[in-house]
Amino acid sequence: MVPERDNTVAAGGVKVEALSEREGVRGWVFDVVIRRGADAEPSRHAVSLSWADYEYWSHGQASPSRVAEAAIAALLGARPDVALPERLDCSTCRRWTRDFDARIAAAL
């Protein structure tokens, strides 16, 4: 369940927020809204996070929704102009950014 607090992650003028969470076959799926500045239309994405990636990146120290938000924020911090697909797995972010693991650690 997404915590009832301000769970928004901001990076470089981009805000990432998980609106809802559901359990999938191998982890979680989050409905995420990305706001890339005051003038841009927000975009919505289904972001999946496997249990293995969650454990690898957070060791249980952050909520799954927080890890998913941090993953997207870390990717957009490295590649602000990347066009994200409607459905995205957090493991894909590692393939798009060489120093992704360090970036997500800093975001968490």
Image (cartoon, rainbow, N blue to C red):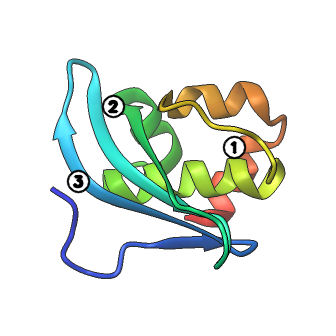
Q: Residue 80 falls in which quadrant of the image?
A: bottom right
Disc sitting over residue 51 in the figure: 2
Residue highlighted by disc 1? 101
The label nearer to you, 1 versus 3, is 3
**Residue 84, image x, y percentages:** 62, 37
**Residue 50, image x, y percentages:** 37, 28
Disc 2 from disc 3: Cα separation: 17 Å
Disc sitting over residue 20 in the figure: 3
Q: Which amino acid does label 3 sit on?
A: Ser
Secondary element at image label 2: helix
Q: Residue at x 58, y 49 (%)?
A: 72
Work out whether residue 95 can be spotted.
yes
Secondary element at image label 3: strand
Disc 1 from disc 3: Cα separation: 24 Å
Could you tell whether 42 is left or right of 3 in the image? right
Secondary element at image label 1: helix
Q: What residue type is labelled 1?
A: Asp
Q: Residue at x 82, y 47 (%)?
A: 79
